[in-house]
């Protein structure tokens, strides 16, 4: 089976027959479109059997109007390990035909595609992947009660990770970082306390913080993980006081050569500036520095305006993607049958980016209002009220991608509730929250309990208030025990 080189273009450009600049880890075209880029700059080889060519020639001459099916390997796998690797591939594989409601790679990042080829070299990664396969299979079946098998495998994987962490060299490897990531994904499916939309990045955030926020830019797998993780890590840092990175650490995590080209990256940079502004504000207030306070208010206004500009762009892209449906329905909400496969994926992609852009705009609006006078606050409140209505509309539109494909709506509904003091709007949001609670059982079933937790009035208070409210919803203080063992499995 000789290997034949087949180019270095990414999968998206190859499928669309577009020229790819082959930039690692994301090509320019995929960055511009905001879509998942797989395999850019990586040399591929087609493995062809010498006998397959002869079979093809015979079949072609016999029936020139039909093409022979691709060569398939049939029969049982050669070992338990082969079966195991195959089961992981089944969980992470993604194509334009994949069901985005349950696909792991779509929900949690393209780095998962690299996991199968790394199995067999790190005991913790192997055990974590095995546990994740079991958790995901049960979740896909619609059963929400955790099984005994999941907990046994999860516990075993934790034990393997503890052994690995005793070796400083192996502990710092990208495979170990990935093992931590897979275990926290297991926590999401098992429903351990605090395992909300962003908590799958919690363990990775701790490892990256121990590194000072640095990562190996020469390690393509590690770079892919970071590109998938930087958003959730940033949200985790904003929503949890215990994982707020320093200014330099944020620079290493968020800033990279792609950020000057993408609006997604620019939006993350805006949010990454928030902790630094909060810290400098505390210092300015303590020292009575009025000039510094004024400068910080200007900085907060600048990043808010940038976030609103980015939101406007993605709103247009999302509505344009929705218009590609083959039906004439006036509703933005569509179903899969209304799209060709490629347009369905683009619709889902822009819907998710649009939703997270709404989160950023609302969050930064809240922070800017903490700097503003009563007169300025009225205009800002009117703006965020419009964003809140958009989030509510988007929640209905994104239901077709539940449970995993629209898990980001937990963040959107959370910030919408905080942003709007209107009782009727909050009641509407609470009804939607109860729907998403069934997808993420580790969060509280009612968001209205937050009414009893004060937000504060300063930027620093708002940050602390947001973290306090998020902690209340993820039940980190009220539930510390894992779910009970299921007697049936």
Image (cartoon, grey):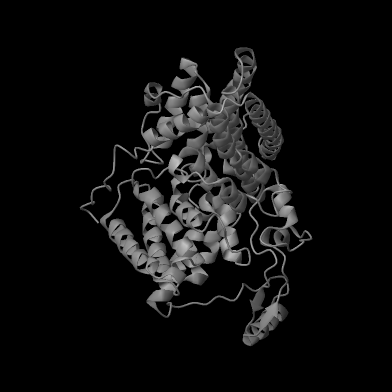
The answer to whether one can see residue 338 in this image is no
186 left or right, relative to 294: left
When the figure is inspected, residue 385 is found, relative to residue 192, above or below; the finding is above
Q: Which residue is drawn at 70% across and 75% down?
A: 63
When the figure is inspected, residue 282 is found, relative to residue 157, above or below; the finding is above
- All told, the count of numbered labels is 0
Q: In which quarter of the image is the N terminus?
A: bottom right
List the single residue furthest toward the right: 19
The answer to whether one can see residue 418 in this image is yes
Q: Which of 68 and 462 is in front in this view?
A: 462
Q: Where is residue 439 in the image (x, y as percent from the top left)?
A: 41, 41
Residue 132 location, quadrant? bottom left
List the single residue furthest toward the top: 375
Residue 322 location, quadrant? top right
Q: Which of 131 and 377 is in front in this view?
A: 377
242 left or right, relative to 343: left
């Amino acid at each position: 089976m000789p290997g034949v080189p087949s180019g270095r273009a990414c999968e998206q450009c190859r499928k669309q027959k577009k020229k790819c600049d082959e930039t690692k880890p994301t090509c320019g075209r995929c960055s511009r479109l905001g879509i998942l880029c797989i395999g850019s700059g990586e040399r591929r080889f087609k493995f062809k059997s010498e006998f397959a060519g002869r079979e093809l020639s015979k079949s072609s001459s016999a029936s020139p109007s039909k093409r022979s099916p691709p060569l398939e390997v049939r029969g049982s796998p050669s070992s338990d390990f082969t079966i195991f690797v195959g089961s992981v591939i089944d969980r992470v594989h993604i194509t334009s035909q994949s069901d985005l409601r349950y696909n792991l790679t779509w929900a949690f990042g393209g780095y998962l595609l690299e996991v199968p080829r790394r199995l067999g070299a790190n005991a913790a990664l192997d055990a974590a992947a095995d546990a994740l396969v079991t958790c995901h299979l049960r979740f896909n079946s619609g059963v929400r009660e955790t099984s005994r098998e999941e907990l046994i495998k999860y516990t075993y994987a934790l034990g393997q990770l503890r052994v690995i962490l005793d070796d400083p060299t192996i502990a710092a490897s990208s495979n170990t970082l990935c093992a931590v990531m897979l275990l926290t994904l297991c926590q999401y499916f098992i429903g351990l306390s605090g395992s909300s939309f962003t908590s799958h990045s919690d363990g990775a955030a701790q490892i990256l913080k121990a590194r000072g926020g640095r990562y190996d830019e020469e390690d393509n797998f590690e770079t892919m993980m970071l590109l998938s993780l930087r958003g959730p890590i940033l949200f985790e840092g904003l929503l949890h006081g215990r994982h707020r990175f320093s200014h330099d650490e944020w620079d290493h995590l968020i800033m990279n050569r792609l950020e000057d080209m993408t609006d997604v990256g620019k939006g993350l940079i805006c949010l990454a500036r928030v902790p630094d502004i909060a810290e400098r504000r505390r210092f300015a207030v303590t020292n009575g520095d009025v000039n510094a306070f004024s400068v910080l208010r200007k900085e907060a206004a600048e990043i808010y305006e940038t976030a609103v500009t980015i939101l406007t762009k993605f709103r247009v892209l999302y509505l344009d993607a929705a218009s590609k449906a083959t039906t004439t329905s006036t509703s933005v909400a569509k179903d899969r049958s209304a799209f060709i496969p490629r347009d369905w994926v683009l619709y889902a992609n822009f819907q998710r980016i649009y939703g997270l852009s709404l989160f950023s705009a609302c969050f930064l609006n809240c922070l800017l209002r903490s700097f503003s006078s009563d007169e300025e606050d009225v205009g800002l409140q009117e703006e965020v009220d419009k964003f809140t209505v958009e989030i509510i509309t988007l929640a209905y539109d994104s239901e077709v991608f539940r449970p995993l494909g629209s898990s980001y709506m937990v963040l959107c509904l959370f910030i919408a509730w905080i942003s709007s003091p209107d009782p009727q709007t909050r009641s509407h949001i609470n009804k939607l929250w109860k729907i998403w609670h069934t997808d993420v059982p580790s969060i509280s079933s009612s968001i209205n309990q937050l009414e009893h937790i004060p937000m504060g009035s300063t930027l620093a208070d708002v940050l602390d208030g947001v973290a306090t409210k998020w902690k209340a919803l993820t039940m980190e203080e009220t539930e510390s025990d894992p779910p009970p063992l299921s007697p049936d499995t």
